[in-house]
Image: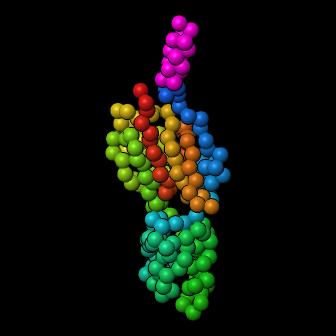
């Protein structure tokens, strides 16, 4: 009888253990930066930039950052902007233009469209979506048409490109999303 009670207690503990959510692990993701992305945001493939050269309407346009982190501009050719902020990219373009093309160029670089984020797993429509400033995991799920019928609704796994490579963690639904992030909504057990 004592053995049956032990087996019953052990099996019910294991069964109920599947209902618990895992502990949130956001330390490594927090080190990559959360919250407002304006000041710390570095350019990468998939971003679209609005480059304005004052007084030169034929050079001002929207340019896409290619897979190698480069932008192709008239006169100066391709310029490596990947990993730089918009202010750093503007100074680099100014230096290239002042090198025999324009006298005292003034350049502004703005982000026209951020690179997309990706959402997979137990959502209605997984895939690639356009990033919206101030987005959270919950907002990303809403953009993907909501949870699937067997989705774990209180946490997600988020993968982000960090300084040393890809970083991932288990995050709450209120965790901020950044451009280029991949979100996986896991399946619940019961």
Q: Is residue 10 magenta?
A: yes
- In the displayed structure, does residue 173 sit left or right of residue 149? right
Return the residue nearer the eye: 30 or 75.
30
- In the displayed structure, does residue 188 sit left or right of residue 176? left
Look at the image and tell me whether residue 126 can be seen. Answer: yes
Which residue lies at the image location 49% right of the left edge and 28% below the top edge? 18
Which residue lies at the image location 50% right of the left edge and 53% below the top edge? 181
Q: In this picture, is 143 found above or below 179?
A: above
- Measuring from the top left, give residue 131's x and y in whole percent: 45, 53
Which residue lies at the image location 45% right of the left edge and 54% below the top edge? 117
Look at the image and tell me whether residue 86 can be seen. Answer: no
Which residue reaches farthest top? 1
- In the displayed structure, does residue 28 sit left or right of residue 135? right
- Measuring from the top left, give residue 189's x and y in whole percent: 43, 30
Return the residue nearer the eye: 54 or 150.
150
Q: In this picture, is 41 found above or below 59?
A: above
Quarter placement of the C terminus: top left
Magenta-drawn stretch, dominant element (helix, strand or loop): helix
Which residue lies at the image location 55% right of the left edge and 77% below the top edge? 80
- Measuring from the top left, give residue 179's x and y in whole percent: 50, 56
Start and end of the magenta stretch?
Answer: 1-15
Instruction: State which quadrant residue 57 falls in.
Output: bottom left
């Amino acid at each position: 009888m004592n053995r049956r009670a032990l087996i019953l207690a052990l099996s019910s503990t294991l069964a109920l253990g599947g209902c618990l959510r895992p502990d949130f692990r956001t330390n490594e993701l927090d080190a990559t930066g959360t919250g407002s992305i304006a000041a710390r945001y570095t350019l990468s493939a998939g971003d679209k930039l609005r480059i304005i050269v004052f007084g030169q309407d034929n050079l001002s346009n929207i340019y896409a950052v290619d897979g190698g982190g480069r932008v192709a501009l008239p006169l100066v050719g391709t310029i490596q902007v990947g990993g730089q902020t918009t202010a750093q990219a503007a100074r680099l373009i100014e230096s290239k233009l002042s090198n025999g093309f324009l006298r005292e160029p003034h350049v502004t670089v703005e982000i026209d469209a951020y690179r997309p984020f990706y959402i997979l797993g137990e959502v209605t429509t997984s895939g690639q979506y356009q990033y919206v400033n101030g987005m959270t995991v919950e907002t990303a799920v809403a953009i993907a048409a909501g949870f699937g019928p067997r989705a774990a609704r209180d946490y997600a796994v988020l993968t982000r490109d960090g300084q040393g490579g890809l970083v991932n963690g288990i995050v709450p639904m209120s965790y901020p999303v950044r451009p280029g992030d991949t979100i996986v909504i896991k399946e619940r057990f019961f």
